[in-house]
Image: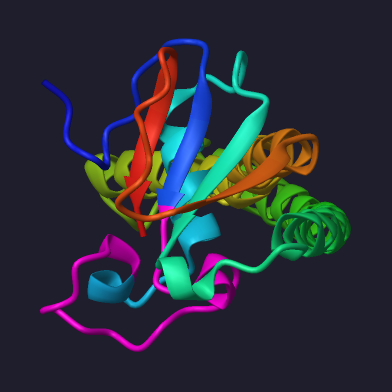
Amino acid sequence: MHTPGDVVPRDADLVVRVGEIRDLFAAPDTDPLAQNEGEVMGEPALLRVARKLMAAHRMSGAHKLVVLLPENRVEPDLAERTRIALERYCTLKLEDNEDQLRLIRREAGSLLLRGVLILLVCVGVSSVFRSETITFLPLLVNSALGEGFNVIGWVMLWAPVEAYFFNPIPIRRSSAVHRFLKTLQIEIRPQGRETAPARLLSGIDA
C-alpha cells in the first residue's frame, strides 16, 4: 500500500494536491496542521514533484500532471494557463541551471590553476625534505614533513576535481527533470472527485 506521497515506478500520470494553483509554483505559508504536504512543509508543490522524480531516477511513462484543487478553485481555462506557466517556469529553470553550470566551470578552472601551482610547490618542498639537503632535522621529521607536503599538494586538487565532476551532477539531474516536466500536459480535477487512474505513478500531496 502506498501513501499519497509515494512515487511508484509504473507508467502513469503524476498527481499533486494543492490548496490553490499558485501553490504549484510558490511556497505557501508553513502550516503543520494543513492537509497538504506542501503547506505543512512550506514548499511549492512543483519542487516536491521534481525532488520525488529525482529521487526515483525514473521519468518515463507519465504524460500528464493532474492537479487536484478544491472545487471552488477550479476555473474553465485554468489547465491551459497552468500549462503555459509550467512551460515558462521550466524554461527559466533550465536557463538558470545552464548559468550555474557555466559558473561552476569557471570556478573549477580557477581552482585547478591554483591547485596545480600549490601541488608543484608542495611536491618541490616535499622533495627537499626527502633529500639529504636538510641535515639539521632528524630523519623521521624530514620524512614526515616530506610526506605531509606531498599529501597537502594532492589534496589541493580535490576542489577542482569535485567542481568539475561532482558539483554539476544535481544540476544536470534537475535539468533532466524540468525538461521532462516541460513536456507534461496539465489536467485540473476537483478534490474529492478524483478517481485514481489505472496507471497511477504518483499521488503527491503538496
Residue at image point 83% right, 53% down: 87
Residue 160 in the image: above or below residue 177: below
Q: Nearer the viewer, residue 92 or 71?
A: 71
Name the magenta segment's main secondary structure: loop
- Verify whether residue 192 appears in magenta: no
Q: Is residue 148 left or right of residue 127?
A: left
Residue at figure coordinates x 30%, y 51% from the top left: 192
The residue lying toward the viewer, choosing from 93 and 45, is: 45
x, y (%) of residue 88? Answer: 86, 62
Residue at x 72% of width, y 33% of height:
180
| Residue 21 counted in the magenta span | yes
Q: How many marks?
A: 0
Query: Quadrant location of the C terminus?
Result: bottom left
* 114, 100: nearer the viewer: 100
The residue stretch that appears in magenta: 17-38
Task: Give above or below for 24 relative to 118.
Answer: below
Q: Position of residue 171 (x, y in %)?
A: 66, 47
Q: Nearer the viewer, residue 85 or 81?
A: 81
Query: What colour scheme was applied to this rendering of the protein?
Result: rainbow
**Residue pictured at 29% horizontal, 40% vertical:** 139
Q: Is residue 179 left or right of residue 129?
A: right
Residue sitting at the far bottom = 29
Specify whether residue 173 is in view: yes
- In which quadrant is the N terminus drawn? top left
Relative to residue 189, is residue 179 drawn left or right? right
Point out residue 20 in the picture as x, y percentages from the top left corner: 49, 74
Q: Position of residue 98 (x, y in %)?
A: 86, 53
**For residue 118, side relative to residue 162 (left or right):** right
Q: Is residue 133 visible?
A: no
